[in-house]
Image (cartoon, helix red, strand yellow):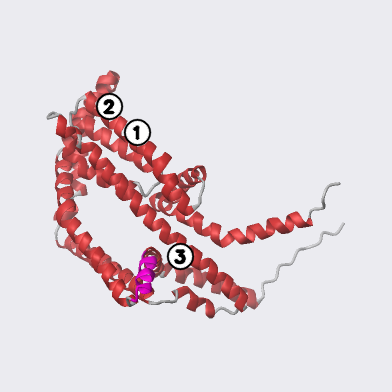
Amino acid sequence: MKKESVKIEITLKSLILILAFILGITALWELRLVFIFLFFALIINSALRPYVDYFQTKKIPRIASTVFIFLTLFLILSLMTVTVFSETVEQFKNLVMLMPQLLTNILAEIFLIFPWLKDLIDLQEFKAQFLEELTSAGGIFSSGISSAYTILNSAITTLGGVVTITMLSIYMLVRKKEIYSSMINFLPISDKTKKNYNKKLVLVERKLGEWVRAQLFMMGFIGVLTWVGLVTPSIFFDSYQMHEYALPIAFIAAILEAIPTLGPIATAVIAIIIAIGSGSSIGTVIFIIVLFYIIQQLESSFVFPQVMAKVVGVDPIVTIVSVIAAYILFGIMGAIFIVPLIAVMRILLGSEINTMVENHMSDTPEEV
């Protein structure tokens, strides 16, 4: 029996399309910084546009309200830098200086629970290696002209990025018409499709804005709650020491709150390690555990469902599973942005999925 040979032909058109696709992907990768700037500018625009629109209803020009909002935010950040951030940095310095003692105390507690580890771990050698790593990590600040140039270059790049994002955000906010509306008009599609795309993008912008405002509220709420919880015992107990590190821990709690559900747990572990390492009493350690258990319950049972889940419209179980999966696949940034991404995909694909389901149901014959 004669075997049939399979002949694969690649036309010139197919080759050009493949090369164009590869060049397009390469160009997108090389221009990734531009898209990152544009993405953050869109997020800021989504968060602040409702306020600019509100001021416009009060007969205040968009440019004036936009400048007023950015100046207000700048003044708030400056005030926080002078007051809260400066004290936070000071407490961070004290915490770093306490690291060797923290390490010694933690290892002593571990050896007390597991005495057989003393034969496997040399405390002095382990401590020396830890201090060497800590010193080398900070060596960038004193390693000569090349490091100074690197730091200066990074600072200029960061400042340039902040200025670029700010200017893009201002430009978007000043425009009464959304920037994507003009882009859609260039697409070779029908007016009905353009209107449909524009409607979806308006919903996406609104949802992103709600997510940003809800996320900032939750970060501030958890940060303040953590600080109050850590400082309050110092009013009643002179031997209590954790208030000396309340601001750094509260700052960490606020930042980690960007990772839903897992943030308070990670902060609790850090706070417990600091409490044990600083030589705090067993009562203080128990208090830290109870405090962060209450905070975690408030966050997962009340704050998150009432604020974030309601805004984004994603089931809490789906959120937790998605956050864990995104963290495993893409790291911290994936865990932070997976929730708004799910919300956006629901808006963009929701109507198509509903249409497919309805068509399938209509095509299915009714049972007699």
Query: Does residue 297 show up magenta in the picture?
Result: no
Count of numbered circles on the image: 3
Q: Residue at x 25, y 28 (%)?
A: 285
**Quarter that holds the N terminus:** bottom right
Rendered position, 249 above or below 120: below
Query: Does residue 52 show up magenta in the picture?
Result: yes
Callouts 3 and 1 close, C-beta under 8 Å: no
Residue at the far front: name it: 58
Label ID, residue 205: 3
Callouts 2 and 3 close, C-beta under 8 Å: no
Question: Which residue is disc 2 drawn over?
Answer: 286
Decide which of 253, 11 is in the foreground and name it: 253
Mark earlier in primary sequence (3, 1): 3
Amino acid at circle 2: Ile
Q: What element carries label 2?
A: helix
Q: Is mark 1 on a helix, strand or loop?
A: helix
Q: Is mark 3 on a helix, strand or loop?
A: helix
Give the overall secondary structure of the magenta segment.
Answer: helix
- Measured in 3D between alpha carbons, the distance from the residue under mark 2 to the one under mark 3, in whole angstroms, is 44 Å
10 Å crowding of disc 1: few (<14), some (14-19), many (20+): some
The mark lying in front, picked from 2 and 3, is 3
- Measured in 3D between alpha carbons, the distance from the residue under mark 2 to the one under mark 1, in whole angstroms, is 11 Å
Label ID, residue 293: 1
Magenta stretch bounds: 48-59
Amino acid at circle 3: Glu
